[in-house]
Image (cartoon, rainbow, N blue to C red):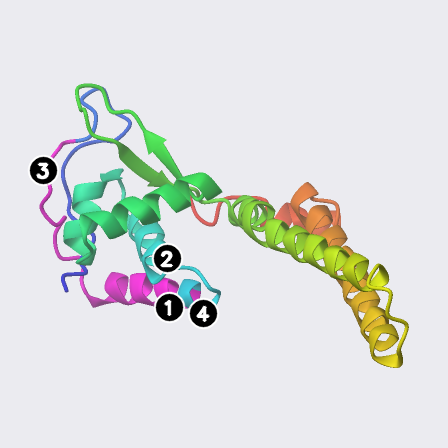
Amino acid sequence: MAESDARATGADPQGEAGVQDFGDAAIGDIGPAAQAVCDAIGDLMAFWGFQRSHGRIWALLFLMERELHAGELAATLGLSAGQVSMALRDLDHWGTIHRVHVPGSRRTWFRPETNLFRMVSRVFRDRELEQIRTLARTLQQARAELQTSGRKDRAVEFRLRRIEGLIAAAELGRSLVERLVAGTLLPRAVLAALDRAIAD
């Protein structure tokens, strides 16, 4: 699996000439250090329940001085076109990467989001918060089903109390995540330290 991710192209991504298109070839050998970073971030994302490719693709983009397209990502990371396409769709949806238009190129190019708080808050909004809301709806439906079942035995009462506790916990979790996403959960000093680019 070729996992190299740095090639000096001589092109300035911000310059008038735009990004040079080298086709779907791997972007060159960046050495074991950058390769280890891509793998480590991929492993961390997998531990948190994401696809390993999510982390590897973001890390590769983060370590590059220019934008990359899907063909380069696939060739360099040893991923299939389908894997890259699905991962890019997810990352783009979460706002952890951005599409870049390059004049004269029909390809779609990508650059990474570098603001850590912005990335985390968007993912929490689109993934964790939605999961908590789904859990809350399911719990409320289960409570309603027990309440209208007509049964009044100890087992039903016990389960109702336990479900009420889960509903309260889900509501607390929803409130905390919503405040985190809105930027009102953390002290201003902590938020100011987080709400900035990881690196120039």
Name the one closer to the observer, 62 or 39.
39
Q: Amino acid at mark 1?
A: Asp
- Tell me the element at label 1: helix
Residue 166 is situated, as x and y percent measured from the top left of the image, at 77, 66
Q: Mark 2 = which residue? A: 55
- Tell me the element at label 2: helix
- Tell me the element at label 3: loop
Sequence-wise, which precedes: disc 4 or disc 3?
3
Residue 17 is situated, as x and y percent measured from the top left of the image, at 18, 22
Q: Residues within 10 Å of mark 2 (few under 14, many from 20)?
A: many
Sequence-wise, which precedes: disc 3 or disc 2?
3
What residue is drawn where x is 37% and y is 68%?
A: 43
Residue 66 as seen in the image, left or right of residue 125: left
Label 3 to label 2: alpha-carbon separation:
23 Å
Q: Amino acid at mark 3?
A: Gly
Q: Quadrant of the N terminus?
A: bottom left
Name the one closer to the observer, 101 or 200.
101
Residue 23 numbered mark, or none: 3
Q: What residue range appears in magenta?
A: 20-44
Label 1 to label 2: alpha-carbon separation:
7 Å
Label 4 to label 1: alpha-carbon separation:
6 Å
Q: Residues within 10 Å of mark 4 (few under 14, many from 20)?
A: few
